[in-house]
Image (spheres, rainbow, N blue to C red):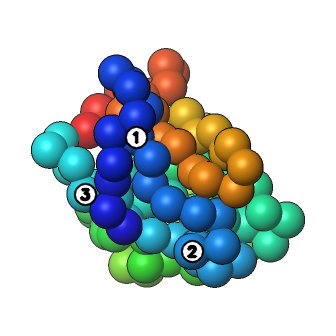
Amino acid sequence: MSAVMKDNDWIRIGMLDEIPRLGARVVETEKGNIAVFRTATDAVFALHDKCPHKGGPLSQGIVHGDRVACPLHDWKIQLETGLAVAPDEGCAASFPIRIEEGIIYLSLVPNEGCPDTV
């Protein structure tokens, strides 16, 4: 997806309908790729597009419920927090998302709580 600057910390990345339900899109940034996911209930989440296990592209994983399964080794990552589901351990940085009139905006400032940084 192409990113358009909106203000200091937020970028416009496109319309909600441009991401299929249970799918993802990649936003390329100067600091690395960010995967933007849409759940079956139209919730939208953003994670660093790198599994904490072996660096697999989370954007290519399968979204189910509020998790994504890494395509390399099937680690489950919580979409809201970026935390790996036990017994696995690790974290992919999560990023704030907001939706206004069907337009998705992404903050490039990661949420606190995860040592992974883009």
Q: Give residue 98's position: percent from left, percent from top.
A: 63, 39
| Residue at left offset 58%, top offset 40% | 97
Q: Secondary structure at mark 1?
A: strand
Q: Which residue is mark 1?
A: 11
Q: Secondary structure at mark 2?
A: helix
Q: Nearer the viewer, mark 3 or mark 1?
A: 1
Q: In the rendered structure, which amino acid carries the disc numbered 3?
A: Glu
Q: In the rendered structure, which amino acid carries the disc numbered 1?
A: Ile
Label drawn at residue 28: 3
Distance from label 2 to label 3 (Cα)? 16 Å
Q: In front: 40, or 71?
A: 40
Labels 3 and 1 touching (C-beta < 8 A): no
Q: Which residue is mark 2?
A: 18
Labels 2 and 3 touching (C-beta < 8 A): no
Q: In front: 91, or 101?
A: 101
Q: Give residue 47's position: percent from left, percent from top.
A: 46, 49
First in sequence, mark 2 or 3: give its number: 2
Q: Give neighbour class at mark 3: few <14, some 14-19, many 20+ (Cα, 10 Å).
A: some
Q: Give residue 103's position: percent from left, percent from top.
A: 61, 53
Q: In the rendered structure, which amino acid carries the disc numbered 2?
A: Glu
| Residue at left offset 36%, top offset 67% | 1
